[in-house]
Image (tube, rainbow, N blue to C red):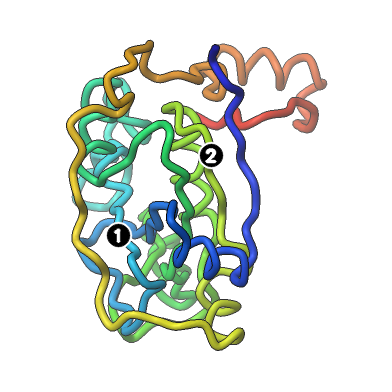
Amino acid sequence: ADPAGEVALICPSTLASAISSDDPPLVLEATVGCAASGASCFVPGAVLFDLAAVDVYEEDATGSPLPLPGNYNLRPPAALRAALERHGVRARRRCVVYTQCRRHTTAAREAQERGHHHRYRPAASREGVADPIVAARLVWCLAYAGVERVALLDGGMSLWLDGGFPVAGEPSPAAPVADFFDGRGGAFPRRPEYRASVEEVAAAVAASGGGGGGGGGLRIG
């Protein structure tokens, strides 16, 4: 059987209990364009996951995307699967994702004026609230790949800290796995329907009269 993927929110108290259980989830802290998030504390056991491992974004000197096939998109399936395996991701192990990437508002405005598309400051001196889009993209990527149970930490690190739950001073090292499917085999990605093509998006926009809206599921791009 090919079980339907589960994507959900998980509250900090439930995650805390799961971490100390006999079957703990793999906790991933999503980062953007850096090996470290610049944070001083982490959910215990969290492994850093730089979206650069799964995304392609080739830019020119001004920060504008280069007109290359597949740019600003997920990496090809073989490279995507290898990246997940390097981070210890397996289809049958539950994954919980959060991020501490923050939008730096002043830098964002200046970057926008220059045409630059990255608006994140990974350094320790950051401002603003954590951007859930960073974590949500990794959640979608995991579901698309075929991870059967994926959760987004509700409230992120802020709510975790507010609840007084334990923290770690450093992220945990990744524990690579040899096979995403644990020897069971199967097509990768398992959920290709979660990803919309340019043609599908154009057709959906046209069908809606150009006003957007409609559509369901985890169909991003």
Q: Which mark is residue 149?
A: 2
Front: mark 1 or 2:
2
Pick the residue in front: 175 or 127: 175
- Which amino acid type corresponds to the residue marked 2 in the rendered image? Arg
Nearer to us in this view, 169 or 83: 169
| Of pointers 1 and 2, the one earlier in the residue sequence | 1
- Left or right: residue 161 compared with residue 123: right
Residue shown at 73% from the left, 16% from the top: 206
Which type of secondary structure does the marked residue at label 2 adopt? strand
Quadrant housing residue 81: top left
Which image quadrant for residue 110?
bottom left
Point out residue 100 in the picture as x, y percentages from the top left corner: 43, 70
Image point (33%, 66%), residue name: 45
Rendered image: mark on residue 63: none
- Secondary element under disc 1, as helix, strand or loop, is strand
Location of the N terminus (image quadrant): top right
Q: Which residue is mark 1?
A: 47
Q: Quadrant of residue 193?
A: top right
Count every numbered label the image shows and give the total: 2
Up the image or down, 16 lies above or below 197; here it is below
